[in-house]
Amino acid sequence: MPSLLAQEAPRRSSGVSESSDCYLAIMRRADSEILVSEDRGRYRLPVLEIPKKQRAAPHLLPAIQRRFGLQTVCRFSVATSQIEPGGRCVVLDVRNPDASLSGEEFWLPVREIRWDEFEPPVRDALWEVFAKINAYATGRLSAKFVSPGWLDEVAVWTQSHLLSRGLELAGLSSQFNMGPDFALLRFETSGSGVWFKAVGHPNLREFDITARLAEFELPHVPEVIGTHEDWRAWLMREATGSALGEGGEPTEWETTARSLAELQLASITHVTPLLAAGCIDLRTTSLHDVIEPWLSGIALLMDSQPEQPPRRLAIEDLRLIERHLRAACRQIQALSFPETLGHSDFNSGNVLVAGEQAVFLDWAQAHIGSPFLTLEYLLLLLRRAFPDNVERLNAVREEYLRLWRPVCSARQLARALEIAPLLAAFAYAVVCDRSQQEVPAFRTEFAGYFRSLARRIYAEAERLEQLSVPAGA
């Protein structure tokens, strides 16, 4: 869950990043052999140290190449709590099975395994590994990207789509995600790089949204080369540029604002099919409908807050929020402002800027709502990058508004800008609440985070109250 608006993010350990041992079940030749070493008559699995709470694949593949000279691809992982609390064993397939081994490791035929020759914790983890391999192979567990040689199938499909672009596949460059139903791969080609991405539950809607964005040929989104319905996967040309804020160009923020406005204006006529594709419904009518249930949940979280500070919001505080949220929704509706495509995971890593163009990535959290929601997220990133730089903030806002002026009156724009921070904060909280419904542990684990979002929303409602803007205006 992105920490975009909260004033106090979920607690994280400070200091040096934590790491853990990752056990490796490196398989070759259709799972008939596994890589092991031997120590005092006991077989051992290779072990690499990787950062905790991060994707394993980007760390493992280059490390395995350096240490063993093996080109591998990740398939799936299993918990190894019997070996190490919070540990894992990753199952990998070898892509160069004839490579020579220079270390103490060797290939052990699976049929010759004697389980008593493994240490009991490693043996138990391997039992689970082979049980899962068997479950995937027999179809008892459903999966798309875990079988031996699954990468070859993806590569053949990828090459078939590259031919129409006059490109040749040159090999796997990086793997960023692993199965069973997710995949994120970067391939080198004879030209620019391409990305293969597949999604599973709970991100299935990202496939439909991405396919729709490609169908409508909207500007400033990645170019999709091909889609695979059964895999819920797509192939896209690599977007060039630097992440927002890292390019060093003084105009990159204005470029982002202009590109965002161009994308949103182009999306106006496509909001209905984009909603049907799975975009989150953040239209003002929908936001209005969830005000009361969301505040009821926040009231319970405030009651359960163990200590102060931070301040618990009282009932009268929540009533202030409710009054101004309802008024803001009514006012946006009265202004008849167009509702457009927006991005609820708007962070600098999801924006690439090159020259006079920006490209917006990762549309799993796409929404339909007021265009000013995403503008507010952009301005928040800018405030964090350049605190107290009002001149720069105004320049970015003005570049965005410049494209909207032919569509909307000055009165519409001024009023929408005034209430946008409140609605943007609430809309973001609604999206986070939607995420916790898909992953129920969120509400308990991130109770403090949701309380912090509520305090942020209260601050925006109080700002409007102090501006003497009547809630019923």
Image (cartoon, rainbow, N blue to C red):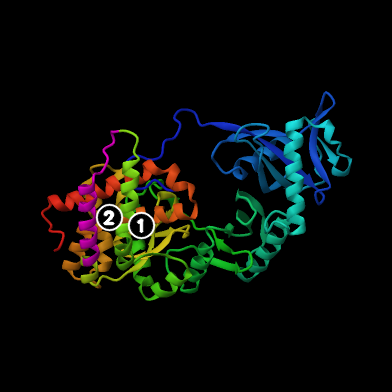
Circles 1 and 2 in contact, beta carbons < 8 Å = yes
* Location of residue 101 (image quadrant): top right
Q: Is residue 362 left or right of residue 414?
A: right
The disc at residue 179 is: none
Residue drawn at (36%, 46%) of the image: 450
Q: Which residues are magenta?
A: 308-330
Where disc 1 sits, the SS reads helix
* Location of residue 112 (image quadrant): top right
Residue where numbered disc 2 is placed: 396
As drawn, the residue found furthest toward the right would be 112
Where disc 2 sits, the SS reads helix
Q: Is residue 218 above or below residue 313?
A: below
Q: Quadrant of the C terminus?
A: bottom left
Horizontal and vertical percent for residue 399? 27, 60
Horizontal and vertical percent for residue 12? 44, 35
Residue drawn at (33%, 57%) of the image: 293
Q: Is residue 357 left or right of residue 470?
A: right
Disc 1 or 2, which lies upstream in sequence?
1
Residue where numbered disc 1 is placed: 256
The kind of residue on which mark 1 rests is Thr
Of the pair 99 and 355, the residue shown nearer to us: 99
Horizontal and vertical percent for residue 292? 30, 58
Residue 87 visible in the displayed image: yes
Residue drawn at (80%, 41%) of the image: 34
Q: Main secondary structure of the magenta part?
A: helix
The kind of residue on which mark 2 rests is Val
